[in-house]
Image: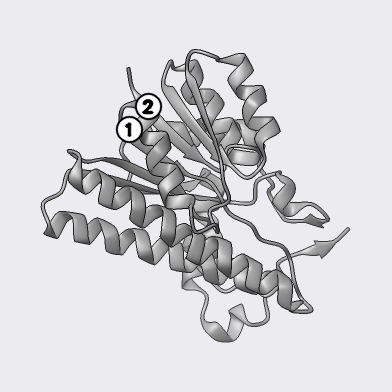
């Protein structure tokens, strides 16, 4: 049986991807801070789900991940969907520091743990949700866009490292556009996407072993033009409208 671990499975894209994997009859280990939504998913698929509660920022998170893998008897796919971010035009310090802690430090802690495990255990597939926000600095969400740029670069670096070490580890960097999830609550971004349709596109990209996938086609076009904009124009671009 195919085995996957989804970190950040209590809500949003992590939960939707976990559901799709379960429908495809994967054995899925789900991990997040909140136990209740994980147990709800366990109740739906009692024979296929293993549950572990932990915050990726906790010191014990790597060991809890390894414990979950051990209970499952191994893992072929690791999917990292744990992340936070808010619009923060006033640069409220707690928002900025918490975002960096989760999206950079917590992300690195978990990705390094699964990389080392796969390096020692015949490889596997590491897939992460980053964001198109990593392409350019987004004024309404400074720490969020900067942390996503870190994730983009880190996965690229690990893919090169795996190739240099001749490890059988594959990577998929998923870069969605603006998805209608709690992350965007209180704001209105252009072209917001449905989370169920986005999850289906994510799973399709993972199954196809894509290295980098911007979701969806509208955002692939938008990101193309974002990259062409010179800094003098990007600095003046208005990205959001307040509700």
Q: Which residue is mark 2?
A: 72
Q: Label 1: few (<14), some or many (≥20) within 10 Å?
A: many
* Location of residue 70 with respect to 113 vertically, above or below: above
Q: Secondary structure beneath disc 1? A: loop
Q: Secondary structure beneath disc 2? A: helix
The residue lying at 35 percent from left, 35 percent from top is: 77
Q: Nearer the viewer, mark 1 or mark 2?
A: 2
The residue lying at 74 percent from left, 66 percent from top is: 87
Count of residue discs: 2
Quarter of the figure that contains the C terminus: bottom right
Q: Which residue is mark 1?
A: 75
Q: Label 2: few (<14), some or many (≥20) within 10 Å?
A: some
The residue lying at 54 percent from left, 62 percent from top is: 103
- Residue 102 occupies which quadrant of the picture? bottom right
Task: Say whether marks 1 and 2 touch (CB < 8 Å).
Answer: yes
Q: Is residue 156 left or right of residue 119?
A: right
Residue 133 screen position, x and y as percent = 56, 63
The residue lying at 30 percent from left, 31 percent from top is: 74
Residue 60 screen position, x and y as percent = 48, 53
Residue 38 screen position, x and y as percent = 62, 30
Q: Out of 85 and 55, give the one closest to the viewer.
A: 55
Q: Out of 79 and 192, give the one closest to the viewer.
A: 79
Q: Is residue 105 left or right of residue 194?
A: left
Quarter of the figure that contains the N terminus: top left
Residue 110 screen position, x and y as percent = 42, 53
């Amino acid at each position: 049986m195919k085995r996957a671990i989804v970190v950040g499975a209590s809500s949003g894209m992590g939960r939707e991807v976990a559901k799709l994997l379960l429908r495809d009859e994967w054995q899925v280990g789900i991990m997040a801070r909140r136990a209740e939504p994980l147990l709800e998913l366990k109740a739906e698929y009692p024979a296929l789900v293993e549950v572990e509660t932990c915050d990726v920022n906790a010191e014990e998170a790597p060991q809890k991940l390894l414990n979950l893998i051990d209970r499952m008897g191994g893992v072929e796919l690791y999917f990292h969907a744990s992340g936070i971010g808010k619009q923060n035009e006033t640069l409220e310090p707690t928002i900025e520091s918490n975002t960096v802690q989760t999206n950079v430090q917590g992300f690195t802690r978990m990705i390094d743990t699964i990389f080392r495990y796969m390096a020692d255990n015949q490889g596997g597939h590491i897939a992460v949700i980053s964001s198109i926000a990593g392409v350019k600095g987004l004024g309404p969400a400074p720490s969020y866009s900067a942390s996503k740029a870190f994730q983009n670069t880190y996965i690229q670096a690990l893919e090169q490292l795996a190739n240099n070490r001749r490890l059988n580890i594959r990577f998929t960097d998923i870069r969605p556009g603006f998805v209608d999830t709690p992350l965007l609550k209180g704001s209105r971004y252009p072209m917001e996407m449905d989370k169920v349709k986005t999850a289906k596109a994510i799973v399709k990209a993972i199954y196809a072993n894509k290295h980098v996938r911007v979701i969806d086609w509208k955002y692939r076009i938008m990101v193309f033009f974002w990259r062409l904009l010179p800094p003098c124009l990007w600095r003046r671009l208005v990205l959001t409208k307040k509700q």
